[in-house]
Amino acid sequence: MCGAVLLLSACTVGPDYERPSAPVPAQYKEAGWKVGEPLDALDRGPWWSVYRDPVLDGLENQIDISNQNIAAAEAAFRQAEFLVAQARAQYFPTATIDASAQRSRGGGAAGSGTTPVGGGGAGGRIANFFSTSTTASWTPDLWGRVRRNVESNVASAQASAGDLASARLSAQGALASDYLQLRVADELKRLLDATAKAYAESLRITRNQYASGIASEADVAQAETQLRSTEAQAIAVGVTRAQLEHAIRC
C-alpha cells in the first residue's frame, strides 16, 4: 500500500514541457557570428561609466527611483515572486486555530450565600468561559497539480525578471543617448552662436562697403541671408536641446 502511494505521488498531470526544435546553422560564412545566448536577467552593471561623466553617473543612478516603467516592471516581478511563494505553500499542511470567549452572570439561589460581583441589585456570579480549537489539513500532491502550478509560476517569475532587466537597460540606454545628444546640442549651439556673431560683423562690413560703393546690393543680401539662416539653425538646436532636457527629466 505504501509503495502504491509513493508511486502515485511521483506522478504529474500532463507531459513535461519540451522546447520545440528550431534547427539553426552552427556558424555563418561571415566571421564573428555565433549562436545567440539570451541573458535577459543578467545585470549589465554601470556600463555608462566608460564616458567618465559625473553628471551622467548621477542621472543613471536615479533611474530606479524616478522611472515609472521600471517601477511597474519591478512591481510585476514582486507579484510573480509572491505567486511562487504562494504556490509552494500548498506543499505544506494548513493549520487553523479558532478561539472564543464568553462572559455570563449566573443566578444565585436564595440562602446560597453567593455574593454579587461588581454590585447591582441582582445576585449571581460572573463567569468567564474560554474555548479554543485547532484543525489541520494536508492534501498530498498525488497528481502533481501543485508541482505544475509551482513550475508555471517560477517560469512567469523568470520572465518578469527578464522584463525588469530589459526595462532597466532600455531606460539606461535612452537616458545615455539623450544626455549625449544634449551635450552635442550644447556644443552645436555654442558654435552657431559664435558663427552668427561673425556673420553679423560680416554683414556690418558689407553694408559699409555697399554704402561706399565697393560692394553690391547682392553681397549685402547674401551676407544677411547667411546671418538669418545661422540664427534659425541656432533656434532649432535650442528647441531640440529643450526637448532632450525634458526627456531626461522624465
Image: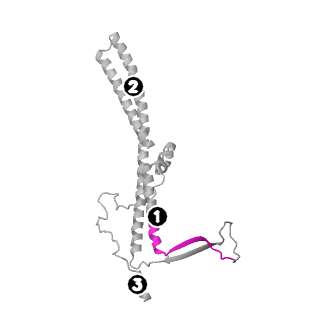
Q: Nearer the viewer, residue 46 or 26?
A: 46
User: Is residue 87 positioned above or below 70 on the image?
Assistant: below
Dot in front, 2 or 1: 1
Residue 3 is situated, as x and y percent measured from the top left of the image, at: 42, 88
Q: Amino acid at mark 1?
A: Phe
Amino acid at dot 2? Ala
The residue identified by callout 2 is 196
* Quarter of the rendering occupied by the N terminus: bottom left
Q: Nearer the viewer, residue 67 or 48?
A: 67
Residues at discs 2 and 1 in contact (Cβ within 8 Å)? no
The residue located at (42%, 27%) in the rendering is 194
Q: Residues within 10 Å of mark 3 (few under 14, many from 20)?
A: few
Highlighted range, magenta: 83-110
Amino acid type at mark 3: Leu
Which residue is the site of mark 1?
A: 82
At horizontal 45% and vertical 49% (from top left) the residue drawn is 67
Instruction: Name the one closer to the observer, 108 or 84.
Output: 108
Secondary element at image label 1: helix
Q: Quadrant of residue 72?
A: bottom left
If you read the primary sequence from the N terminus, does the residue marked by circle 2 or circle 1 appear first? 1
**Measured Cα–Cα span from mark 2 to mark 3:** 87 Å
